[in-house]
Amino acid sequence: MIKKIIISACLLLSLVSFAQEGTSSPYSFYGIGDIRFKGTLENRSMAGVAVEQDSIHINLENPASYASLKRTTFAMGGTYGTRTLKTNTESTNTRRTTLDYLAIGLPLGKFGLGFGLIPYSSVGYKIEKLSSEVGETNKRLSGTGGLNKAFLGIGYEIAPHFSIGADVNYNFGKIETNSLEIITNIPTGTRELNAAELSGVNFNIGTMYQTKINKKLSLYSSLNYTIEGNLTSKNTRNISTVIYNSNFDLAVVDTYGDQKSQSDVKYPSKISFGLGIGESKKWLLGGKIAYQKTSGQENAYNKADNVGYGRFGSVSLGGYYIPNYNSFSNYAKRIVYRGGLKYEKTGLMVNSESINDMGLTLGVGLPITGSFSNVNFGFEMGKKGTTNANLVQENYANFSVSFSLNDKWFDKRKFD
């Protein structure tokens, strides 16, 4: 049954990953868009803390974790998100539903294999500056698309509770932007269409280590490094003169044809380190820090004089609690309760203001009776950006659900 689910879900996410508009943030105009969380809902509900060597949950942040899997694991998650976008003078609300990841983990003795598909970044914005004054220049900007990541990784257990691993990631996607510039009371304007087809390969390496402090407590650690790479961007630009009506329906009067170019976009290196303490299958409290040289991948179509890209940094604190994972008489005691806090310095600077993100995460894991599988629900709320310097503050709330399904594959049959 799980094999049929995996095949169906792979086809679904492969199609949706190209089509979905995964964000409604005006800050997704910059670089290659909003960078999505790379990990399962279980880890996201703990603000990204992922230090435990789990035998039934796949850890997408560190490939060394694949070596800890004891059962074939299929994981899939999605999110319904709302945002309130605020300036000093007005506000508006937006909604989005997205698929977040699809991943499969296979235990192979001391080795473990992981592969899947993750939306890496999302572009989705609609911005307009309109004036009724004669002679004023008006603008309407929009953008869609993003970057997806197909990954294949392997982990190896060097010694008990000590493993290493590596991922190879193929990044691909398309970003399209539309810019319309008009002057009040003049029925003609200029439209610029840009399309960037992105592709490239990069690598990710990691290690995980666990040791006993005493009879009950264990210390967990995780170290992960993403190696710097390049994305090839094939760019197409089309500039046209258009006429429009009061509904902004456009008709092309004249076009200057497609201008094609190619450029390289940096995929920056990133290092993250996590440390935690806890009692196995009972509770865990951990933290994670991450650092990246530069946050942005500026391309030809979205350069701006008032924008800069600095260093990325994040700090997270989170954990889980299980009242009694082995209880047969009380289902509620087997529920996993998760929570966390995060602070992220995105590195994006607009009008000399740093665009930062801070939030609270909560979640529960509901075991499926008679199996090692579970259904997870998560909630995340936070704030990104600022209203200073004529910028936009985003207050967001995300509601997520995921499935982690487990099965035994590759067992030798004792009877025919």
Image (cartoon, rainbow, N blue to C red):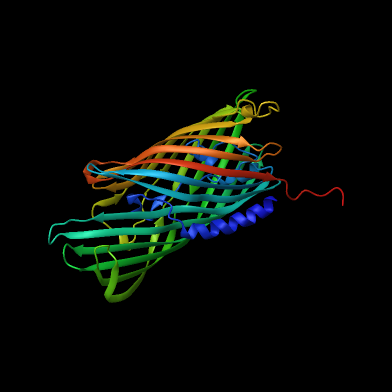
- Residue at 21%, 56% (x, y): give it: 130
Task: Name above or below for residue 65 compared with residue 171.
Answer: above
Q: Is residue 214 left or right of residue 288?
A: right
Q: Is residue 1 visible?
A: yes
Residue furthest out toward the right: 415
From where the camera sits, is residue 30 visible? Answer: no
What number of labels is visible? 0
What residue occupies the far top of the structure in this picture? 215
Residue in the image at 32% along x and 55% along y:
126
Q: Measured from the top left, where is residue 177 in percent x and y?
A: 34, 62
93 is higher (above) or lower (below) than 147: above
User: Looking at the picture, does residue 51 appear above or below residue 135?
Assistant: above
Query: Taking 200 as reference, is 241 above or below it?
Result: below
Question: In the current view of this chain or complex, which residue is farthest to the front?
Answer: 246
Q: Position of residue 66 (x, y in %)?
A: 62, 45
Quarter of the image where one finds residue 277: top right
Viewer-side residue, 118 vs 185: 185
Q: Position of residue 328 (x, y in %)?
A: 71, 28
Query: Closest to the observer: 30 or 367?
Result: 367
For the residue pair 289 and 139, the one nearer the viewer reads as: 139
Q: Quadrant of residue 220?
A: top right
Residue for point 64% across, 45% down: 405
Question: Residue 352: x, y in percent?
Answer: 24, 45
Q: Which residue is found at the position 59% from the left and 53% from the top?
A: 115
